[in-house]
Every structure is written in C-alpha cells, then in structure tokens.
Image (tube, grey):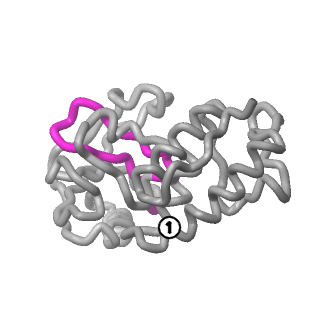
Amino acid sequence: MTRIKKLAGDDFNSIRKWFADTVAAIGGDGWHADDNPSVDPIVNGRTGERLFSDEEATIVSETMKRVFAAAQDWPDPDFVYDLAMKGSFDVERFYPGFVLDMSGPAGRLGFVSIPGREFPNLLVEEAGLYAVVEFPQKTGKASEHTHYTVWQVDRLPAGYEKNPGTIEVDEYDPIEFTNFGDLEDLLAQRARQNAF
C-alpha cells in the first residue's frame, strides 16, 4: 500500500493539498522538485532511507510533470520548489485566510513565521541581514498584495525554527515597499548601509 495519493486535479488548491499530504506522509522532509525519484532514488539526508518506494516514485514522477505544466499559469511558477520542500507553511496556520503563493528569501530559512504579530510574516535573510517581512493586507494570496513592510531582527536565538516566538524584532525604522520582487535588493542595500 502506498502512502502517496494521486493528484486530484491540476488547479492550485489541489496541487497545494497534494504537496502538503505528500510531505507529511514522508515524515515532513520534502525534496528538490527537479529530482525524479523514478530515475534516481531520493534519500532522506538525516536517515539515509529512500523517501519513496518504487510505486510511490512513479506516482511522484507522473504528478510532478502535471504540476510543472500547471504552475506555468501561476503568478510565481518557482513556488513549486517551495511546495516540494515544505509542503505547507506555518504562516497560513498562524494567520487563517492568508495564502502563500510565491517564492522569496524566506525559503532559505525554512519559511519561519512569528506567531502573535498583527500581520502575516516571514523571516528573511539577505547579505547577512535578518528581517521580518509583513503582509499588512492580512488575507488573500500573497501575490495579490500591494504593500509590504520589513522590520529588522534584533536577536535570532538558537532554536528559533522550533520556537519562532523567541525572535526579537526591532519595531523602529521599517522599510515599506510595493513590489515584492524588490525585497532582496532592499535588504542587501540596507545591509551595505548598515543603517537598518
């Protein structure tokens, strides 16, 4: 019996659900979306065990072909890579009604979100500068938001991934911007100025 179900449909929500279910079924560790488990087995880096049986590898390989084709119509087709690695995102659990549907520098840190803040948020890093990007419109797809705010992180304690509430944010001198694609450049510029 396989742990991996077949994709129910090629729409965004069906694909999101398939990734969430699949990553959970294999223990919470995703894979690189370009890896084809039917060609080369994908191995869990911590345990050394294969993520997928032969039958599951066939399902995943066939599904990924459909996913990559469908993703071409998404606002950010590269979001497939984030879904394959993570499956689901805490920011959506912490902030119901918010939908993450685009990639960004948050992926490098595992899509950490600080619960209890007023707005949905993600921890980001660029050029050694850690910050929290917030989505003040609160709900809807992130790609449809038109305003973002960035706050510098004062302290990033060990173990922040498992306890993101311990991250300390500097609540002064935010950066406000309207094009999410500018985020990495804005952070790099601030890091160079060292004036965040």
Is residue 125 on the magenta stretch?
A: yes
Where is residue 92? Give x, y as percent: 33, 40
Q: Look at the image and give the residue range highlighted in magenta.
A: 107-127
Where is residue 174? Give x, y as percent: 18, 55
Q: Is residue 81 above or below residue 186?
A: above
Is residue 49 in view from this perspective?
Answer: yes
Instruction: Identify which residue is drawn at 64% across, 65% down.
Output: 65
Quadrant location of the N terminus in the rendered image: top right
Where is residue 27? Give x, y as percent: 64, 30
Quadrant location of the C terminus in the rendered image: bottom left
Determine which residue is flagged by label 1: 70
Q: Residues within 10 Å of mark 1 (few under 14, many from 20)?
A: some
Instruction: Identify which residue is drawn at 47% across, 44% down.
Output: 17
Choose top left, top right, bottom left or bottom right for residue 142: bottom left
Q: Is residue 192 above or below residue 109?
A: below
Choose top left, top right, bottom left or bottom right for residue 176: bottom left
Q: Is residue 167 above or below residue 41?
A: above
Instruction: Identify which residue is drawn at 37% across, 57% down.
Output: 101
